[in-house]
Image (cartoon, coloured by chain):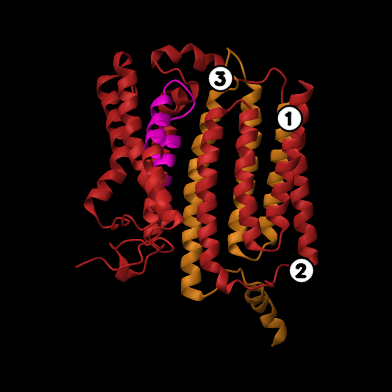
Chain colours: A orange, B red
Amino acid sequence: MSAAVFGLCGAAAVGLGLYGLITHPQLLRKILAFNLLGAGVFLVFGVVAHRGAAAGFGGDPVPQALVITGMVVAFAATALAVALLLRLFQATGSATWRADAASQASDGPAGT
Amino acid sequence: MNMAFAFDCGLAVVVTGVAGWIVLTRATFGAVAGFVGFGLLLTLAWVRLAAIDVALTEAAIGSLAGALMLSATARLRPREPTTAVGPGPMSRVVAALLSAVIAAALAAAVLSLPDPAPTLTPAAAEHAAATGLGNPVTNVLMAFRAMDTLLEKVVLLLALVGVWSLAPDRFWGGRPSLLRRVEPGGTLDFLARLLPPVGIVAGIYVLWEGANHPGGAFQGGTILASMWLLVLMAGIAEAPAVGSRRLRLTLIAGPSVFFAVGLGGLFLGDAFLAYPEAVAKPVILVIEFAMTLTVTVTLALFLAGPPTREPFP
């Protein structure tokens, strides 16, 4: 029963992460939000693992092992994303998704 | 039971609250600080889900990811716009609706999971004797689904190559530099001399115990990596040049030993990555030690970032 509570918590983390990913203009915040989304997915999977407890084990070891692998890969991706972000900052002096650049492109024809 | 349930509910509320803080707070630094706390709280949640191996990984990875984000924040901060232009209110409402719908669908799925839950636990328990390892998760990682673990190590390596390749041309083959120099005799300098002996023993212990208890190559490697980072940050040792042959051999040690054992299984045993049953445990330990070496160096170099100094002539 109590495992389901963490499942709901994971679902909430996915929702919050997705919202942050879409709405934050700063790229570092997007990376943070994406990690939040991933953590929520892992947590939901952890609940599935917990429900599969049998044979004296506290949880199904297969999904648990997959979550561990997933966390490692997520960290590697995060490290790459942060490195890309820092390089972008070095090259352009900006670490923000510029909404004005996108709107300029769409406003262009209207202005002329 | 009720006490435990109350604790779980409280923990879930706090975790969700911190997740909300990370997304909604204005200051980036506050969000990153929240992220570090989020990782630690998740560790508790994993313990409550009886997944101690995952909890150890979360604690280890959460702290490394926190350190990565903090150093990125410090590098970006001077130029961070105080009022960044976000999407308009209309887009925000649409994004919020979309996120809420997805979260609700996921919550509904969690609440309506099938009742005799599908599980591979009996299968994992049945074949545990074949490898001689007592920790079911290590069994899955190193034997039953060894292919995943092998490919994961390759992904780590590819990501590191990606990070390195972001260096400007003239620094290629040079050394990465960690954020700041410290004054000798300061706290960081002191800790960097005091902690590594203890941390190295703890890391190897976690690796060794991973055979029978929660722990393993990855968790042990993370502890070792943090010890190395401490020494690098205090300026006691230099980060290795990315062009160094010794470094590169260390980096490929884990995947290549793993791959060689896999190929051996193809020729001597039944299939790729099939371990001969009589020596399964020693073989797995050899792979784990090689992997720990690679994990330690890779993780530390992720935090060190691309090379920023020209290679010495």
Q: Which residue is mark 1?
A: A4
Count residues near mark 3 (Cα–Cα under 10 Å), then give few for <14, some for 14-19, many for 20+.
some
Q: Percent from the top left, x then y, of residue B305?
A: 41, 58
Q: Which residue is mark 3?
A: B120
Q: Percent from the top left, x then y, of residue B297?
A: 35, 46
Q: Is residue A5 left or right of residue B303?
A: right
| Mark 2 or 1: the one toward you | 1
Residue drawn at (40%, 50%), measured in percent from left and top? B192
In the image, are marks 1 and 3 on the same chain?
no
The chain containing the residue under callout 3 comes to B
Seen from this angle, which residue lies furthest bottom? A112
Question: What segment is highlighted magenta in the picture?
Answer: B199-226
The reply to whether the magenta stretch includes residue B204 is: yes
Q: Which residue is mark 2?
A: B88
Q: Percent from the top left, x then y, of residue A20?
A: 68, 56
The chain containing the residue under callout 1 comes to A
Measure how far apart labels 3 and 2 are at the Cα level. Answer: 48 Å
Point out which mark residue B187 bears: none
Tell me the element at label 3: loop
Q: Is B174 drawn above or below residue B131 in the view shown?
A: below
Q: Amino acid at mark 3?
A: Leu
Residue B38 visible at all: yes
